[in-house]
Image (cartoon, grey):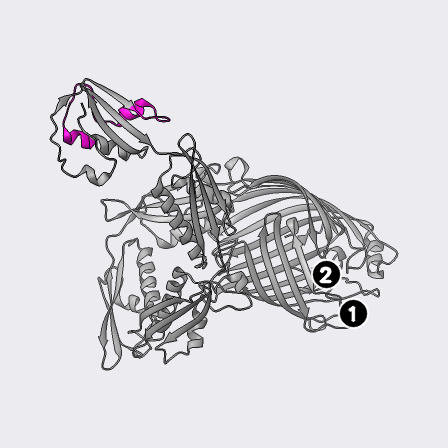
Amino acid sequence: MKLKHLAGLIPLLYATSAIAIEPFEVKDIRVEGIQRTEAGTVFSYLPVRVGDKLNEEDAAAAIRALFSTGFFKDVRLEMQQGVLIVVVRERPSIASIEINGVKDFPKDTLSENLKMVGLADGRIFDKSALDKAEQELKRQYVARGKYGVSLTTTVTELERNRVSIVFNVVEGETSKIKQINIIGNETFSEKELKGLMQLDTPNWISWFTKNDQYSKQKLSADLEVIRSYYLDAGYLEFSVDSTQVSISPNKEHIYITINISEGAKYTVSNIEVSGPEKILSHKEARELIKAEVGDVFSRKVMTDSITKIGDRLGEDGYAFANINAVPDIDKEKHEVGFTYVIDPGARAYVRHIDITGNTKTRDAVIRREFRQMESAWYSASKIKTSKQKVDRLDFFSEVNLETLPVPGSNDQIDVSLSVKEKSTGNFSIGAGISSNVGLVFNGSVTQRNLFGTGNSLSAQVNTGKVNKVYSVSYTNPYYTDNGMSLGFDAYTRDVNTTSTAISSFRSSTLGGGIRLGIPISDFESTTYGLSAEQTKLTLFENSTLQLQKFVDDFGPTTSNLLGSVGWSRDNRDSVIYTTEGTVQRAFVEVAVPITSQQFYKLTYEHQWFYPISKTFTFFLNGEAGYAEGYGGKPVPFFKNFYAGGPGSLRGFNPFSIGPRDINNNSLGSTRRLIGNAEVLFPLPGMAKDRSVRLSAFVDAGSVFGQGLSASDSLRYSTGLAITWISPVGPLKVSVGVPLNKQSGDKVQPFQFTLGSLF
């Protein structure tokens, strides 16, 4: 006797059965039709047990429960003499998945994505998952501008209740933006507005930037850029009325039409400040607002002013300050007044500083860089400084800092710093190449974060035609708790100039020293050093008379005890990808008169970074060097200054600027001036990639003295350069063109350094 046959269709489960069912007691349960699924699995999902009294409602609930597992495509319940029989028909399993015609995506990546939606070998086949995968794949192609993509899916039934799935994809060509029209503009030309947009019609660099491929996200960003452009120019009522994106019948071309309303240009009629003066006086707040009555309205000026007021309140601990610029618009006069309403909120202090991600670096190494303390009043500048100092450790590839309100409190915040460790130690044997010193073999053992303590230990070997250096260095940046550093160096250096633009000689130097660093402030420090050097000189037949006279006067071996004092100030926003800030360095080295040499050297360097825009940075660098002997003794020629090549004057041969001998080889000299001006910018289409950076530069430099004035040897050059942090090491390439090449100058337009020479 059958109790009921229920079809395996979900909608019918909610319908009222036309058959009256007498409830009965379940004496036993039997499962039929299973092949892969264990009977225990069915029992675990079945909400009916032996001894239960089953009615029509319970039967419908049981069928729903089994269908919801996704294992079955048909479920029926039958009853024979008190035995409940569960008859199922299993969904087929996936025997194989094949993807054909895909070129834009790696097949391994597609297989992983299919697996995430439930399509993989051995999984139970679900038609809804297949439909979802098809739609997602098409969406990915559309996002890449391939609107003509064709996708067909074939499902083939196999023996043992299995299926094979084949995706056949015809990618088609990428649809290109054929035309962009802007309607409603009167103040600014269409060309000017289109120049603000990232999207563009095809041009000579579109193959790289992909800016001729439509993207909804890119269009939204472009519309916001245009809106900001108008609002910053005073058009307070500007609006984007509509955008139309159409595609040609052959799906090869895209047409974009943007309809805008400019409105009238507004000027500022009045500026007032409202808020508690005890916390921030209205006079001081007004000084932070850069707009003046009569100025053309600018949203940028307004938002910058709000930011400055918020930062100022943050210095006193008001982390939750809320500043609103309330407008008073006069549409007839086209004027707008603003009342800056300042609500400082409660003064907040830092409850906890949480550090995560430092699997190797000790917590104390990071915390000692913090200037914001726990249980102290919140300070926006101290938090910013703390992040900068952790970033300067150069132990992490990512440093992210957040301030989080404490739930249930209006006067507490937590500071969360998350870091991503990068390798700070390595053992390497390899090679580098440079246009000025040729092939260089190098080996090194370096650990900049020894056992996670922040201490640095390195042993390096570098060999080349010009320089051979073997050195061991150790530095403890926190020798004392207040930040004094202590370091030791031992080195041997062999210089051979026979294959360079320098007058021929060879020097072998053995030395060692001790360094002590004393911090003045967070971004300023002094260093003191004492080192001893012994230098052996070898001259050649073509060595100049000046070099021969030095060896005749002082012998082929000289010893020096050198004292040094250095000072530096560095407030760059990042040491890896600098966009703003300055660097100043001054260094004095003096030969103590108890040795055979008596001289001193002074060097000064000043760098300035200024952000022109979000992606362009202006960079100025100036260097000066001065050396002089005392006690009637000259400066050793191997301590002379040189210029030319990467790092000083690109486009000219390395070390080639300045006085020369009779063989036209550089002698170097006791005075040096270097100036560099650059505009730094990302590679087009790679604004978020901080491993590559381009620059346009102008260099100037002079090495003089010994009867030669600064103007006599002053040279200029200009060109382009690229810096790339490549997998095999940092790479710098420049193409420089001398602007005032003189007779006898040695030029080298293409120059590069790779690897350890960076």
Position above or below: 370 against 672: above
Which label's residue is closer to the chain start, 1 or 2?
A: 2
Give the residue at x 74% y 62%.
668
Residue 655 is tagged as 2
The answer to whether residue 639 is left or right of residue 151 is right
Residue 34 is tagged as none
Task: Give coordinates of residue 198: x percent, y percent.
Answer: 45, 66
Q: Quadrant of the N terminus?
A: top left
Measure the alpha-carbon separation of dots 1 and 2: 14 Å
Within-10-Å neighbours for mark 2: few <14, some 14–19, many 20+: many
Task: Please name the residue that numbered disc 1 is placed on.
Answer: 744
The answer to whether residue 399 is left or right of residue 727 is left
Position above or below: 239 against 546: below
Q: Amino acid at mark 1?
A: Gly
Give the residue at x 57% y 62%.
694
Element carrying mark 1:
loop
Task: Give coordinates of residue 349: x percent, y percent.
Answer: 29, 48
Position above or below: 673 against 411: below
Q: Amino acid at mark 2?
A: Phe
Q: Is residue 38 magenta?
A: yes
The answer to whether residue 1 is left or right of residue 751 is left
Q: Is residue 417 visible?
A: yes
Element carrying mark 2:
loop
Residue numbers of the magenta segment: 32-61
Residue contact at pointers 1 and 2, CB within 8 angstroms:
no
Q: Is residue 334 magenta?
A: no
